[in-house]
């Protein structure tokens, strides 16, 4: 009885193996990587956008200060 149960369990594992492993790899490896990739790209995008705005403001301020104080 015990050997039959073990054999049946083994056959069940073998029949589910390709689908189960693919699903587990998708859940445990690819999904966290996709989330981390999305998080990093959005963070880099927001940081770059912030730096471009800061650069634009600084250049505008510098242009104003040059006109006001550095009259040649």
Image (cartoon, helix red, strand yellow):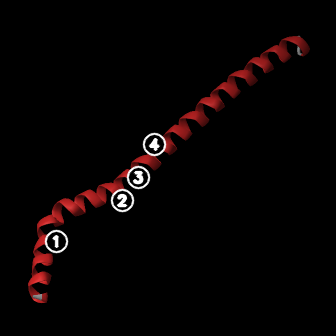
**In this view, 5 is above or below 65:** below
Residue identifier under label 2: 28
Q: Earlier in the sequence, mark 1 or mark 3?
A: 1
- Contact (Cβ within 8 Å) of mark 2 with mark 4: no
The mark found on residue 13 in the picture is 1
Residue at image location 70% in from the left, 28% down from the top:
54
Residue at image location 75% in from the left, 24% down from the top:
58
The mark found on residue 38 in the picture is 4
Left or right of 35 in this view: 62 = right
Residue 72 on image: x %, y %: 88, 11
Rounded to the nearest angstrom, the CA distance separating label 2 from label 3 is 9 Å
Secondary structure type for disc 3 = helix
Q: Is label 1 or label 3 in front?
A: 1
In this view, the residue in front, 4 or 68, is: 4
Q: Earlier in the sequence, mark 3 or mark 4?
A: 3
Look at the image and tell me whether residue 10 can be seen. yes
Secondary structure type for disc 2 = helix
Q: Earlier in the sequence, mark 2 or mark 4?
A: 2
The quarter of the rendered structure image containing the N terminus is: bottom left
Residue 44 on image: x %, y %: 55, 39
Q: Is label 1 or label 4 in front?
A: 1
Rounded to the nearest angstrom, the CA distance separating label 1 from label 4 is 34 Å
Rounded to the nearest angstrom, the CA distance separating label 1 from label 2 is 19 Å
**In this view, 22 is above or below 55:** below
Q: Earlier in the sequence, mark 1 or mark 2?
A: 1
Residue at image location 78% in from the left, 16% down from the top:
63
Residue identifier under label 3: 33
């Amino acid at each position: 009885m015990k050997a039959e149960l073990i054999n049946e369990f083994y056959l069940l594992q073998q029949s589910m193996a390709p689908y189960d492993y693919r699903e587990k790899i998708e859940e445990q490896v690819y999904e966290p990587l996709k989330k981390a990739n999305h998080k990093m790209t959005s963070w880099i995008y927001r940081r770059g956008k912030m730096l471009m705005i800061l650069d634009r403001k600084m250049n505008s301020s510098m242009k104003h200060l040059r006109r006001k104080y550095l009259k040649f």
